[in-house]
Amino acid sequence: MSPTRDMEVLRALFVPKWSSDVRLDGKTAVVTGANTGIGKETAKDLASRGAKVIMACRDMAKGEQAARDILRAVKGAKVVARQLDLADTKSICQFAETVYDTEKSLHFLVNNAGVAICPYVTTADGYEMQFGVNHLGHFFLTFLLLDLLKHSAPSRVINVSSAAHAMGKIQFDDLSGEKDYHPVRAYAQSKLANVLFTRELAKRMEVFGVMVYSVDPGAVNTEITRHIRRPLVDLFKTFSFLIKTPAEGALTIIYCVCSPESQMVNGGYYKDCANAESCRAAQDDATALKLWAVSCHLLGIRWR
């Protein structure tokens, strides 16, 4: 067997093969971070199934270009780019207000946007950037859009996490990272927070017909890796044949959108288009509840 063929066989073990002809006509979705990578591929796929997709993007020039790309690729696509900066609660409020002003329903909220392994910097509201965007920004966005999700039930929230969640610990005494910041540790904490948020939200929302799932998209070649430096870059290159394309990385998100509810585990953690087991820390309900309370306190919201 040729080396190329060997690589293809090996790669096939790591890249899920799943497809579905489920249509989403009449459904509306919000996808954050939809101007590039996994978010853009998710938006494109959902649009190809007939859904109206609101592409929530920090950079509107890139967002509008991504929307044009999808309109060219998908005949009759219903996509619109809207401004959303998850590092600024005012921007999140403005985005949610626009959604309520323009949409009668919301069936899918895909919390995909994120920052990874970046130098220490804070959001507009003073939170450490990775925790602030990856967790608090999406927590607040979900809170604001929940009435529309309930109204549109059955509906779904999909939180994009990472295998890195297994390295995470919620540092309740230093969530801002001011005492001891490490970019990898902060990223892992934010991804663990995504899974814990999923578990707690799922418990609270099931009675309203809103299902919640977290997703590990796998190792994907996207812009989120732009802050990664050597030796991790060298490691990425060495195992590049195992790195998924953005379209392959989006598959498990789309699986969680399209699969029948009877096949899904509410609050479940999904990877490679199947239910998987998150790490032990991600299954700690006491930590999930504490994180919920702390997040509400930080954001100044009452969410019972």
Image: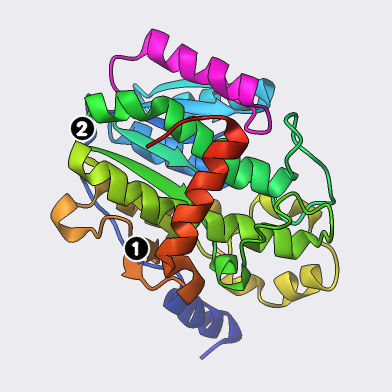
Q: Position of residue 46 (x, y in %)?
A: 35, 37
Residue position marked by numbered label 1 in the rendering: 273
**N-term mark: 2 or 1:** 2
100 in magenta: yes
Q: Position of residue 265 (x, y in %)?
A: 25, 60
Q: Position of residue 18 (x, y in %)?
A: 31, 61
Q: Position of residue 193 (x, y in %)?
A: 54, 55
Asked whether residue 73 is in view, the answer is no
Residue position marked by numbered label 2 in the rendering: 153
Q: How many numbered discs sit on the rendered protein?
A: 2
Work out whether residue 83 or residue 197 is closer to the camera in this orientation and state it: 197
Work out whether residue 268 or residue 254 is closer to the camera in this orientation and state it: 268
Tell me if 27 is positioned left or right of 237 in this view: left
Question: Any mark on residue 157, and which?
Answer: none
Three-letter code for the amino acid on which mark 1 is drawn = Cys
Q: Residues within 10 Å of mark 2 (few under 14, many from 20)?
A: some
Which residue is located at x 83 percent, y 52 percent?
Answer: 178
Work out whether residue 95 or residue 40 is closer to the camera in this orientation and state it: 95
- Residue range in magenta is 83-106
Q: Residues within 10 Å of mark 1 (few under 14, many from 20)?
A: many
Task: Please say if 277 is above or below 184.
Answer: below
Q: Which circle, 2 or 1, is nearer the viewer?
A: 2
Colouring mode (rainbow / by chain / secondary structure / one colour): rainbow
Asked whether residue 142 is in view, the answer is yes
Which residue is located at x 36 percent, y 30 percent?
Answer: 146
Tell me if 188 is positioned left or right of 292 in this view: right
Work out whether residue 126 or residue 24 is closer to the camera in this orientation and state it: 126
202 in magenta: no
Q: Secondary structure at mark 1?
A: loop
Which residue is located at x 43 percent, y 70 percent?
Answer: 278
Residue closest to the far top = 101
Which residue is located at x 44 percent, y 75 percent?
Answer: 12
